Amino acid sequence: MSAVGLIVEYNPLHNGHVHHYTRAKEISGAEYSVAILSGPFLQRGEPGIVSKFARAEMALAMGADLVIELPAAYATQPAEWFAYGGVALLHATGVVDSLCFGTESGTLDLLLPLSHTLAEESPELQERISFHLREGMNYPAAYSRAAAAAAGFPGEESEVLQVLQKPNHTLGLHYLIALNRLKSPIRPFTIPRIHAGYHDEMPAHSAVASATAVRRMLLTQDLSAAAPYLPESTLSILSREFREGRGPVTWDSFRGVLMHLLLTSSPQDLASLHEVTEGLEHRLQRLIYTLKEPKVDELLQALKTKRYTHTKLQRMLAHILLRHTKAQMSPSALAHGPGYLRVLGFSRGGQMLLKKMKKTASLPVIVKPSSFEHPQLELDLRASAAYANAFPSPEMHSIFRDYLEAPIRLFN
């Protein structure tokens, strides 16, 4: 009963994801698949265009067997902790024996040896990161420089540095580092991303577009414009969610509540929240009064500098919105790993995996959140409720769906 693990967001699930899923099953030889899916807020800080339940349904319709939620404590984090949370969950199932992820190159030749070097997090590496941050670099750039130097490849033109400047290589490296730290027997595989780049805003191929391009089409045109790039099942789920007032969700959906929090919080209150660092609480409150319109996109543009990337700032706003404190998101807290395996949905094959996990799982398997208590789960439930409250047509059932409905069962 072999199973391949995928760490995903599916925002929304498109043809490129179908290719990844199909190739992952092929190259791993796995009979089953387990998807670790981000909840309502994603790694780059933005909200999902539709709910985690709708995106889990997309995954099951594609063929995934078991969908497990990545806790909010890890979902909206830099690559290191996002990857650690996802890999730790796959490891904890006890049924996953391979992990497949996409990279720009489609090879692990450089990433694997580099991951062994970096898994220890030496003081020298931390010192190099701090040095580059003091030079004014943002964190991703500082980490890439420090990692290349730690591996013995300093310099602007080093191959390692060039590799780490690609976002999927960086994320892939952190998956490998997490496998090392957990001493996990899970075997890693990678496949090359096809055609559309990670942040491409326009379609680059007749059948494949990036999630960014697809979201742009969904927000600016009718669904038919995005149809060539989506499986029929995804298109059907999106149509239903939009029609029933559960999407699309964007940062503008949270404009009112976020602006209220920023306008009524003291600098001290903001400074206690995760990702509000280096005086950003003062910059936030200074710049908010200069905006022409109370829009989140305009605030992000005003805040952005060479040091603070758009992604870093989006994540900061997500943590402000959800009131995530520095203590809740501290490295020492996150290093313990996720505390449970929250099931969002499963197929008939997933039902068999869950049966096996009764014996193999090293964490509690949660199908009814109301019957389990954990600080991380409390954050998940609050995030889901806050997200559903921002629907175009919010309903109390949607806001409390985590408590009211069992996991999705899709038995094809």
Image: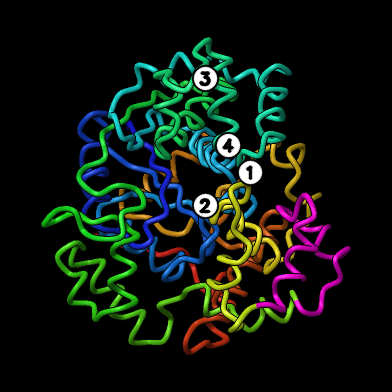
Cα distance between the residues tagged 2 and 3: 24 Å
Residue at the location (60% across, 32% down)?
142
Q: Is residue 267 left or right of residue 290?
A: right
Q: Nearer the viewer, mark 1 or mark 3?
A: 3
User: In terms of secondary structure, what is the magenta stretch mainly?
Assistant: helix
Report the disc number at residue 148: 3
Q: Is residue 122 left or right of residue 203?
A: right
Circle 2 SS class = loop
The numbered mark, 3 or 4, whose residue comes first in the sequence reads 4
x and y percentages locating residue 375 in the rendered image: 74, 55
x and y percentages locating residue 376 in the rendered image: 69, 54
x and y percentages locating residue 162 in the rendered image: 40, 27
Q: Nearer the viewer, mark 3 or mark 4?
A: 3
Circle 4 SS class = helix
Cα distance between the residues tagged 4 and 2: 11 Å
The residue identified by callout 2 is 43
Contact between labelled residues 2 and 1, with CB atoms less than 8 Å apart: no
Report the disc number at residue 338: 1
Q: Which residues are magenta?
A: 263-290
Contact between labelled residues 1 and 4, with CB atoms less than 8 Å apart: no
